[in-house]
Image (cartoon, rainbow, N blue to C red):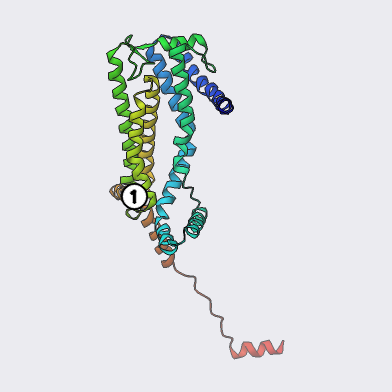
Amino acid sequence: MLDFFGDIGHAIMVPLYYAVSFVLVGFHSLLSQVMDPAGGLTWVLSIVGLTLTIRAALIPLFVKQIKSSRNMQLIQPKVRELQKKYGHDREKLAQETMALYKDSGTNPFASCLPILLQMPIFLALFRMLDQASKKGKAHGFLDEKLAQQFGDSKLFDLIPVSGTFLNTKGVTEVMIVAAVLVLAMTATTFLTQRQLMSKNMPADALSGPYAQQQKMLLYVLPVVFAVGGIAFPIGVLVYWTVSNLWTMCQQFYVIRNNPAPGTPAATAKEERDRAKGKLPAGEVAAAQAVVVDEAPQPKRQQPQRQTKAQRQKKKKR
């Protein structure tokens, strides 16, 4: 039975090894034209390139995530009404809630899609780099020569890129760099989630199951990454930290320029628009409605009354 599941896992991971190694080796080959192919900085920048490529490919999913999160926030008052109405009947409540999600085009799991899709990629990168550094094992397009090269690569000719907080390979600086990256990874995870809750959630959405879920993620995810991060190679920590920075900046841009209605971010955007002499979107719509209402209506032409002579003339015809 274990062999069966092992075969399934291998079948899933092999395509990921090829996909991840293709991008990684591609960036490494490109950077090797101007940098030392065996240098740790070359490999770190290759991992950064891999991260940016993956995150760029996930932009459509991020947009879907933002839309779904916004819809979830906006329908929370209706969800609470359903809870009051059907709180005694869990089955009916579940049916009505799912119907509400369907009618509003909301997927409660869409907010997890980017991170869920990244996890297999993250696992593939972790296993690939970990086995490359320990055994010089090839995966996908990362052949044995490149695997060995990665395992021996050092940042600034001192810090092994394959080193971890728990396995410093006899270099104290590895522990320092790994600790800094773990803290950066944890902090960016926390700040990204906090940014979403503090700026892009309306007041009435800060209570209820969805809000509780967001609060749980706010504190649980950083702890998970902090605990797991001490076992990650520096190369993997670079990947996750850069990915978190991308998420934080991307989310900041979306919240600033397209905030959810009724949120602190929306209020801030309205104030910025007024300062620039622009009307906020809501006021523009209201002004347009007033203009339409006040537009002069075409006057109905009254039929002209015929004179007595005209009527007599018409009868003679």
Q: Quadrant of the N terminus?
A: top right
Q: Position of residue 150 (x, y in %)?
A: 43, 12
Q: Residue at x 31, y 41 (%)?
A: 194
Tell me: residue 77, above or below residue 216.
Answer: below
**On-image quarter of the C terminus:** bottom right
Q: Residue furthest front?
A: 1
Q: Is residue 53 visible?
A: no
Q: Name the residue beneath numbered marker 1.
A: 266
At horizontal 48% and vertical 34% (from top left) the residue drawn is 117
Q: Along the horizontal axis of the image, is 274 left or right of 91?
A: left
Q: Residue at x 37, y 28 (%)?
A: 228
**Residue 115 falls left or right of residue 211:** right
The single residue placed furthest to the right in the displayed view is 317
Classed neighbour count for the residue bearing mark 1: other residues with Cα under 10 Å, few (<14), some (14–19), many (≥20) = many
- Position of residue 6 measured from the top left corner of the image (x, y, whole percent): 55, 26
Q: Please tell me which residue lies in front, 242 or 86.
A: 86
Helix, strand or loop under label 1: helix
Residue 198 in view in this figure: yes
Tell me which corner region of the image, top left, top right, bottom left or bottom right, holds residue 291. Answer: bottom left
Q: Position of residue 258 (x, y in %)?
A: 39, 45
Establish if 185 lies above or below 80.
above
Residue 35 rendering spot, x and y as whole percentages: 41, 10
Give the residue type at disc 1: Ala
The number of callouts visible is: 1
